[in-house]
Image (cartoon, rainbow, N blue to C red):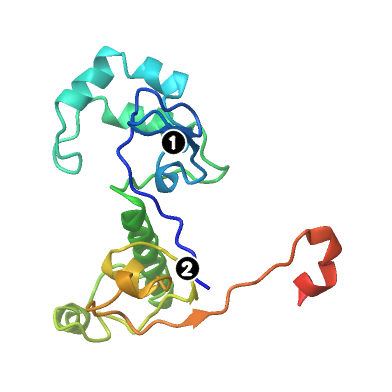
């Protein structure tokens, strides 16, 4: 039996607070997805609404530049404060992305770059064969590498992330995909303390 609980409705952002989202008819719902996890602190978080009143925030909202080409002079400090102050120990670099799919694509690229660099013995200069073959989508410049993902996992709608996504056919129909493998995800039984033996298998 398939059960689709997805609901589409216009949102009243003024009335939505925390994990509760309101529609334009005055109904309030518990939002367990927080807009597909893109609102990590909930709707109208006091700290976010307070900083959005600042002159700097108003300047950024009114003037959206191409950050990769024309970042505002304050950008480096803002990114550092937002991410590095809470970054896990040992992580000292940031790669900002436009969306979740882009973040997944970026992680794939970093994994490939890191792996290939180690394979070359840390060599960063490319030979003529590597340069020529990558422009033809052939090895060695375009190596035959892949990403192992879980069956039934959703990772995004860009080409690489879509190749590792296996949730619904509607996400993938008519799209070419990389021939990447997928594994069965672990299927735990709950409560965990009552099914320890099963969950260890």
Would residue 184 be visible to someone looking at this image? yes
Q: In front: 187, or 111? A: 187
Between disc 2 and disc 1, the foreground one is: 2
Q: In front: 171, or 162? A: 171
Q: In front: 3, or 74? A: 3
Which residue lies at the image location 28% right of the left edge and 64% below the top edge?
158
Q: Disc 1 designates what residue? A: 83
Does residue 12 appear to the left or right of 62 in the view shown? right
Residue 121: x %, y % from top left: 41, 74
Mark 1: give few (<14), some (14-19) or many (20+) Cα within 10 Å. some
Which residue lies at the image location 34% right of the left edge and 27% below the top edge?
77
Q: Residue furthest front?
A: 25
Which residue lies at the image location 43% right of the left edge and 70% below the top edge?
167
Whichever of labels 2 and 1 marks the residue nearer the N terminus, that label is 1
At mark 1, the secondary structure is helix
Does residue 58 appear to the left or right of 114 in the view shown? left
Q: Disc 2 designates what residue? A: 153
Q: Name the image quarter holding residue 83.
A: top left
Residue 197: x %, y % from top left: 84, 72
Query: Taking 192 as reference, is 149 above or below it?
Result: below
Query: Taking 5 as reference, is 10 above or below it?
Result: above
Residue 13: x %, y % from top left: 34, 28
């Amino acid at each position: 039996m398939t059960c689709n609980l997805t609901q589409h409705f216009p949102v009243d952002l003024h009335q939505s607070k925390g994990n509760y989202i309101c529609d334009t008819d005055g109904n309030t719902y518990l939002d367990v997805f927080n807009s597909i996890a893109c609102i990590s602190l909930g709707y109208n978080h006091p700290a976010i609404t307070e900083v959005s009143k600042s002159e700097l925030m108003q300047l950024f909202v009114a003037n959206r530049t191409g950050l990769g080409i024309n970042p505002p002079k304050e950008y480096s400090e803002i990114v550092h404060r937002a991410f590095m102050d809470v970054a896990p120990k040992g992580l000292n670099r940031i790669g900002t992305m436009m969306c979740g799919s882009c973040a997944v694509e970026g992680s794939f690229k970093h994994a490939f770059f890191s792996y290939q660099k180690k394979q070359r013995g840390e060599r960063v200069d490319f030979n003529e064969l590597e340069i020529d073959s990558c422009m033809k989508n052939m090895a060695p410049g375009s190596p035959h590498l892949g990403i192992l993902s879980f069956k039934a996992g959703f990772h995004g709608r860009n080409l690489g992330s879509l190749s590792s996504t296996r949730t619904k056919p509607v996400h993938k129909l008519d799209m070419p995909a990389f021939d990447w493998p997928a594994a069965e995800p672990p299927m735990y039984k709950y409560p965990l303390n009552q099914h320890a033996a099963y969950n260890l298998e």
